Image (spheres, rainbow, N blue to C red):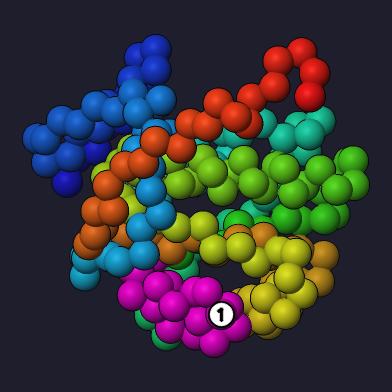
């Protein structure tokens, strides 16, 4: 499998096995949906690398980049995640999951890691979608039972906080797109 990923202006071009796919960034944002059903098909390491590269391209407060990522492919571990995450049932059927974590020892400004890891998580979702994969964000932080459950399951040190679990794979569902634009939520100049 040959993969080339180029960006020209706001177009993303992906070449996989001779197939060409182009996705505009705005199109990726507007058409991305939470995918909870996956094909029984492995996700190539090259795609995971591209997704993690995109995750790390996000901005962070004072460039602290507090994130760490755990890539989980082990079937036994994927099947254990729903035991500690009540909304993680789909993880057991995904070929891979990425756990986004914050290393609190890297914090320069306390508390901003939440925004930093949120941006990294969103970049994972958008990159996966642009590469023809489906994914869903399952929140871990700030719910202590989920944080501790994921921490125990993956031997995460105390100074590292699991933030989200993102299962991903080739989609086995197509929920369609939705128009979520709501002009009633826009306020000009003041509330």
Quick check: 170 left or right of 186? left
Residue at 85% in and 48% down: 111
Q: Nearer the viewer, residue 38 or 53?
A: 38
From which residue to which does the magenta span run?
A: 78-96
Q: Can residue 136 be seen in this view?
A: yes
Quadrant in which the C terminus appears? top right
Secondary structure, magenta segment, majority class: helix
Vertical arrangement, residue 104 with respect to residue 80, above or below? above
| Residue sticking out furthest to the left | 18
Q: Position of residue 133 (x, y in %)?
A: 30, 50
- Residue 61 part of the magenta segment: no
Residue drawn at x 25%, y 32% as measured from the top left: 14
Whole-percent x and y of residue 90?
40, 73
- In this figure, which residue is indicated by the disc labeled 1? 86
Q: Identify the residue at image location x=17%, y=46%.
A: 1
Say few, some or many: other residues with alpha carbon within 10 Å of mark 1 (under 14 / 14 to 19 / 20 or more). Answer: few
Answer above or below: position of 44 versus 87: above
Is residue 77 among the parts visible in the rendering? no
- Give residue 170's quadrant in the image: bottom left
Q: Where is residue 73 in the image (x, y as percent from the top left)?
A: 40, 70
Queried whether the magenta region covers residue 89, the answer comes back as yes
Q: What kind of element bears circle 1?
A: loop
List x then y, in percent, for residue 137.
51, 57
**16 lies above or below 103:** above
């Amino acid at each position: 499998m040959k993969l080339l990923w180029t960006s020209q202006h706001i177009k993303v071009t992906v070449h996989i096995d001779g197939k060409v796919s182009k996705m505009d960034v705005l199109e990726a944002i507007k058409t991305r949906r939470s995918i909870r059903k996956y094909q029984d098909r492995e996700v190539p390491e090259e795609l995971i690398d591209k997704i993690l590269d995109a995750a790390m391209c996000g901005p962070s407060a004072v460039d602290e980049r507090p994130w760490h990522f755990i890539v989980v492919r082990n079937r036994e571990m994927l099947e254990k995640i729903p035991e500690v995450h009540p909304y993680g049932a789909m993880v057991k059927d995904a070929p891979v999951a990425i756990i986004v974590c914050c290393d609190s020892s890297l914090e320069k400004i306390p508390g901003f890691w939440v925004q930093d890891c949120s941006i990294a998580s969103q970049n994972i979702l958008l990159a996966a979608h642009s590469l023809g994969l489906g994914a869903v964000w399952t929140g871990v932080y700030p719910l202590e039972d989920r944080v501790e459950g994921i921490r125990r399951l993956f031997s995460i040190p105390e100074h590292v906080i699991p933030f989200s679990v993102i299962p991903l794979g080739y989609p086995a569902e197509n929920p369609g797109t939705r128009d979520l634009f709501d002009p009633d939520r826009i306020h000009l100049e003041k509330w």
